[in-house]
Amino acid sequence: MNVKINDNVLVITGKYEGRTGKVKATQPKKGTVIVEGVNIHRKAKKARKANEVSQYIDIEAPIDASNVMVICPSCGKATRVKMDITGPKKVRVCGKCGAVLDKAYSAKAAAKAAKKAAEPKKRVRKRDRKAAEAAAADNDAE
């Protein structure tokens, strides 16, 4: 199943076709997802105590995962999800623009790149630095 919790999805078929929403829960064994504001059912709640009131509750029922498409956060289009191996992890990638859909992985990769850029340069001995500068000066003189 290529849909995960907190993904923005577009419903592509059924009564709620064309609606978008955030995935609240997934059920991989059943192949269903619960999308915010989609497939709303009314359920009667009976009063169990004397001070409670009977009422109707609107709940979101699950829909099949094949009826939704993930919306890419970078290009904003509904897309099929591709799997790509970048580094040691297998990540979900947008089929149209190639952007990484796994927010946690992309945030970790950006943090790792920023940390590497902020690392201090490797220390070099003075005599090695002077030798390198002398060699560079000889090459410039020729």
Image (spheres, helix red, strand yellow):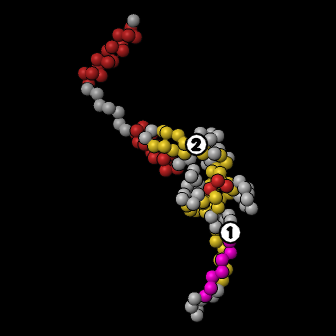
Q: Where in the figure is residue 47, as x and y percent of width and height?
A: 61, 88
Q: Secondary structure at mark 2?
A: strand
Q: Amino acid at mark 1?
A: Ile
Residue to which mark 1 is pinned? 40
Q: Where in the figure is residue 36, as x and y percent of width and height?
A: 63, 63
Compared across the picture, whether 29 is left or right of 42 comes to left
Compared across the picture, whether 31 is left or right of 14 comes to left
Query: Residue at 33% of width from left, 18% of height from top?
Result: 133
| Mark seen at residue 82 | 2
Which quarter shows the C terminus? Answer: top left
Q: Is residue 102 magenta?
A: no
Say above or below: 94 vs 65: above
Q: Is residue 112 visible?
A: yes
The mark tally for this picture is: 2
Disc 1 or 2, which lies upstream in sequence? 1
Q: Secondary structure at mark 1?
A: strand
Q: Where in the figure is residue 30, as x and y percent of width and height?
A: 57, 60
* Residue range of the region highlighted in magenta in the rendering: 41-47
Q: Where in the figure is residue 22, as x and y percent of width and height?
A: 61, 59
Query: Residue at 40% of width from left, 11% of height from top?
Result: 140
Q: Quadrant of residue 29?
A: bottom right
Q: CA distance from mark 1 to mark 2?
A: 30 Å
Q: Is residue 6 visible?
A: no
Say above or below: 141 vs 89: above
Q: Amino acid at mark 2?
A: Lys
Query: Residue at 66% of width from left, 74% of height from top?
Result: 58
